Image: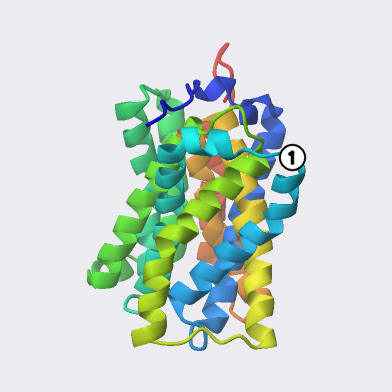
Amino acid sequence: MKKETQTVPVSCMRGAQLPIPLAHTYLVLTAFFLASNHVIGRGVHDVIPPVGLNFWRWTAGALILLPWVLKGGSPVRVFRGNITTYILLGGFVTLSTMLILIALRTTTAVNVSVISVFQPILTVIIAATFLGERLRTVQLAGIFAACTGVAVMLFHGSWSAVLELEINSGDLLTLLAVCGFSAYAINVSRIPLELSSLESLFGIIVTGCIILLPFYLVETIWFMIMPMDLATVGVVLVLALTVSVFGMLMWNQGNQAVGPSRAAVYLNLIPVFAAILAAVFLGEHVYWFHWLGAGFIGLGIWLVVKRVGNGDGK
């Protein structure tokens, strides 16, 4: 078996060449695209099976990227030399999104969102353990503030809502998915320099789809066939473009530029964008606790990314 191409520290990756303000913009847009995914998924969960939607969303993303990959030459040698990296990244991201969609069938969106709040903290712990990455006290306070903001929104500013939470199988699946997303974030630095961002994303998606295929076949045979009407194709294409392609490209590059711990805090913007989009497209209301939570989240992100003393501010 060929030896894997040598990887480099996060600071030396392609994403690190992004201007830091642009990297933060990418991360904000990623949160917006993911929130859009939740709102769209909410509207179609009764008619489109979760694994089928997940599989075809990623497959469509790979097909969208294919012309640019072919135009850039043949990266097969590099893919083969880094196959372990692409299996890890592809498996983590596609299986985690599958678990979230399955979990939403047995637990509430509130429970899923509350558990997902722990991803930034979990990413910090994993990064500190395996990458030796350290955060200043003020940045840890920022992560706490952002998580507090999400909790304020999800629990509607009420302690009774916290006490009424129950743990079920869907909650456990969500927790497992959060672990997968965190593992993906800290392994982005393994992406080889020889490939462009588009080529690397293509490799991640293709290996992920191969891993997803058996689960999709099981769902199709024993649960529900994926409909192929015009509306379903439209949903798949929208999610493929906004999440599988643009969202993933921006997340990978932003993550490489600012580091996994700092990037993870932006995921707390998802409930803010989701509340706004749900109010506009689903007729749901935005209440005082949403704005209060948004304020905490904004403060948290500012603390995490601000310059401290002579630090680099990353």
Residue 231 drawn at (x, y percent) = 67, 85
19 is higher (above) or lower (below) than 309: below
- Between 95 and 296, the one nearer to me in the picture: 95
Name the kind of residue labelled 1 in the image: Gly
Residue extending furthest toward the front: 1
Residue at 58% of width from left, 67% of height from top?
A: 57
Residue 89 drawn at (x, y percent) = 45, 45
- Asked whether residue 271 is in view, the answer is yes
Q: Secondary structure at mark 1?
A: loop
Task: Report the quarter where the N terminus lies.
Answer: top left
- Between 11 and 27, the one nearer to me in the picture: 11
Residue at 43% of width from left, 71% of height from top?
A: 101
Residue behind mark 1: 72
Residue 209 drawn at (x, y percent) = 49, 60
Residue at 65% of width from left, 54% of height from top?
A: 245
Judged left or right of residue 107, residue 238 is: right
270 is higher (above) or lower (below) than 297: below
Residue at 67% of width from left, 44% of height from top?
A: 198
Residue 271 drawn at (x, y percent) = 52, 61
